[in-house]
Amino acid sequence: MSYPLPILVQTPAHSQVGGPLSWLSEQTLAPGTLVRVPLGKRETLGIVWPATTPPAPPPDLVRLRPITDALTALAPLTTAWCQLVDFAASYYQRTAGEVALAALPPQLRELSSAQLARRLKRQAAPPPAATRETPPEPTAEQATVLARIAAEAGPFLLYGATGSGKTEVYLRSVQTLLAREPEAQALVMVPEINLTPQLEQRFAARFGAEAVVSLHSGMTNPQRLKSWLAAHSGAARIVLGTRMAVFASLPTLRLIIVDEEHDPSYKQQEGARYSARDLAVYRGRLEHAKVILGSATPSLESWHHSRPAAEGGRYVRLDMPSRVGGHHTLPGTAGALPLVRRVDMNHQPKGTVFSPPLLQAITERIARGEQCMVFLNRRGYAPVLHCNECDWKSECPHCSAYRVFHKIDRTLRCHHCGYTERVPRACPGCGSPDIRPMGRGTEKLEEHLAELLAEVRRPDGSPVRIARIDADTTQRKGELEAQLAQVHSGEVDVLVGTQMIAKGHDFRRITLVAAANPDSALFSSDFRAPERLFSLLMQAAGRAGRDAGISAQSEMWVQTQHPTHPLYENLKKHDYPGFAAQQLKEREQAGLPPFSFQALVRAEARTQEAAQAFLNAASTFGTEAAASLNVTLYPAVPMSVQRVANVERAQMLIESPSRAALQRFLAGWHDTLHAVRQGPEGKGLIRWAVDVDPLAI
């Protein structure tokens, strides 16, 4: 006897086959079982899917093909996991097959049942997660927060100053859970795994390396499969991962922690553009697991959701305003948050990179054997090469952007498409040899600092050591870890870098942090730019003075042309609540998120006209439905970087005061987008994508 089974397979993006397809099976298989099925001329992995619609009339069984193999050695994926996939696919406007199969390790898609059985036999189960090291006594604030987490349902927003011991709260929350339920599992999410290696080390030190498995894209396929199987079997008690880990199969999940919840890296930018932070909150509700979102600078959405319940708040806000070892309201005391100094660059000589007061402060710190950090969010030597004679600039021939000058290997490199050329000896426009770098990047800062500090000596009389950490210096495997080890050991006096060094690191010896030129984000067209800048500066400031025993007073220096800007006023007071209140007030007046809900439709084509024609045609067909649902469709416009790799890009914003109305509109409009793609307006279109809750506009 053969049974028709609904099975989900990987379908191409934007194929109109969104749900499960039918295959025949001689045995009844539980929903969530992995199977291998014939699809066209190839064989692929599929998942037996729960039937969510009333059964259809019996299909013509003669035409259905039988499944090839059932991977019954693996326990089926849970119903809650399937519901998470269904929700993510429907909310972010993708097919369930695309989301579900992308969430499984790539190597699993290739294995037969016999190969999988051999693999499972080899896979040793890690022992239970017993506490290995003696944890430190919690501070009064940590103890209060832990008691509330134990007593209340959440979800929780843990708002703690940098250095207040949020990681210890995470460790103790996991410890309490495992002591109460030895079989339970915890998911700990970090924005970028290679930026927070010490978190992995701390969990391994507390619970043993065997109890902690990682899941992130930097792992090899066999490593990912091994970690996934350990999590799926329940052998791994703690899974530490990046945004992809939100879809990890964890049958006994009881706790989800999202560290640095404000970080934009939690939003996927390709394929299904999901927010792992938002899905973590949804998954917690689905699986009755507690959710802790932690940050020193929460996203404004999370901050708004954590207002008092009487005002409509949905999260429980937990405050830890003090650093371990001191209180942030007493500048200059041990363990205090750094004193913020603003340098008005309008009063410095034109073209000054490091103001004399900042240089003096750096020199004094080096002489005392302390470390400094200089932060500039632009890699390379200079953003552009420029000819004074004919005004030629180093534009990329394939993108509407400039190629960045990298002095170290004498190249012009486009950071959008990767196109690289040697630096010309003379101007390609007029032949003049007088071509010069304009602006500055981390390479130039490093070189300039080496010149300015050439005569300065460390306490032992040796010359100053400067190191640079950015995407260019950490390309090889193990390079980042080696450079961070040098900083931690005290071999480096001044660390120069991009945002890679500004967040997540526990540098114990750094006592001075300087932001060289942060003003550009103050006047960006993106309404989220001030939020990102404030967060980055607060996080960068948090790298200073983490070891109270080294320096009584740590400092954050900001060189700016706008020292009285409200953002810097709030930064000086370390006043995130004040900054958030002002930003939320502005957003409410302008009807921007979190007081409205947005989606972007992006189109890519060979010409800008074709990209915009597709979007405008889709808009025309959706006007009536949009009006009835109180949804606003804005005109199509070019993206800020209009051309990348010879592909023209345009976008259209869709907005509504109601999340449900926006979702209803997008669900109904999906078929329209497909129809327009097939029609004359879709001619010349390469691809299109819907981005729900976009982070960059």
Image (cartoon, rainbow, N blue to C red):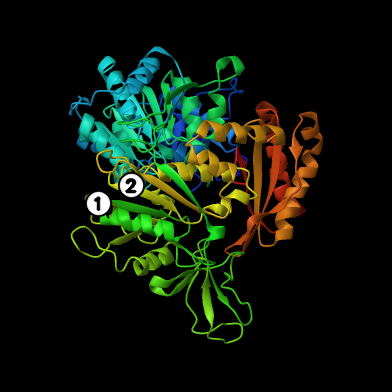
- Tag 2 or tag 1, which sits nearer the N-term? 1
Which numbered circle lies on residue 511? 2
Residue identified by numbered label 1: 485
Residue toward you, 153 or 231: 153
Residue occupying the point 57% across, 67% down: 402
| Alpha carbon separation for disc pair 1 and 2 | 18 Å
Q: Is residue 125 visible?
A: no
Callout 1, which amino acid? Ala
Q: Is residue 170 visible?
A: yes
Callout 2, which amino acid? Thr
Q: Residue furthest top?
A: 151
Instruction: Decide: few, some or many residues near mark 2? Use Cα within 10 Å; few <14, some 14-19, many ≥20.
Output: many
Give the image location of residue 309, x and y in percent. 56, 16
Residue occupying the point 58% across, 68% down: 398
Give the image location of residue 207, x and y in percent. 22, 29
Closest to the camera, between mark 1 and mark 2, is 2
Residue occupying the point 36% across, 49% down: 512
Horizontally, is 382 left or right of 496 in the view?
right
Residue toward you, 405 or 237: 405
Image quadrant of residue 164? top left
Horizontally, is 590 left or right of 375 in the view?
right
